Image (cartoon, rainbow, N blue to C red):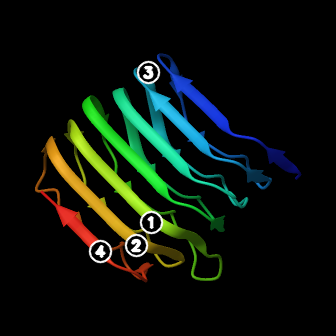
Amino acid sequence: SGTLTGNTHINISGGNVRRVYGGGEDAATNGDTAIYMTGGAVSESTYGGSVSGQITGNTSITIEGGQTASVYGGNEYSGLITGDTGLTFAAGASVNGWVYGGGAGRSADSITEVAGSTNILVNGGTFIHNLYGGGGWNGAKAGNSNIIINDGEFKNDSWIYGGGEEESSVTGKVSVTV
């Protein structure tokens, strides 16, 4: 482990990968993370944060093209994001998994937290599963949750939730605009 001081920028325009993290594995990131996708495919998940390292800053994921499975604004297993998360989807985005503004929260014993707000903006794209302003499962926490849906195709009776999935929590205000 260690600490990265500075911002991270990941651009994906083609190819195939299993997972993408804006931050590191267990290391802390003192700065913002940004993932920008215009093509290619992510077969499992895309995370704005890290596996379990703290992000002292904001995370953002912009998907304008390509295909990905689930998308998380926060971390996978544990760790704090001190700022906000932002997810933006455009017409060329194809999401075959779930969308979470917060982290995964795989266990109630290991918290993934977004101290600020989770922000999801859908200007287009195709979505196969549900969209959550908060995080997934048991150990995910978020401050405020903001979702704006301007366009997009939601298949298979997909639902949009301002809060999180299962026992995750949003401790502040929730706003959903369709």
Mark 2 or mark 3: which comes first in sequence? 3
Instruction: Say whether marks 4 and 1 touch (CB < 8 Å).
Output: no
Mark 3 or mark 4: which comes first in sequence? 3
Instruction: Calculate the distance from the C-alpha at mark 2 to the C-alpha at mark 3.
Output: 31 Å
Q: Amino acid at mark 3?
A: Gly
Q: Amino acid at mark 4?
A: Val
The front one of 100 and 115 is 115
Quarter of the image for residue 82 reads bottom right
| Camera sees residue 19 | no
Residue under numbered circle 4 = 174
Residue under numbered circle 1 = 117
Residue under numbered circle 3 = 40
Mark 2 vs mark 3: in front:
2
Circle 1 residues within 10 Å: few <14, some 14–19, many ≥20: many
Q: Amino acid at mark 2?
A: Asn
Residue under numbered circle 2 = 144
User: Mark 2: which secondary structure?
Assistant: strand
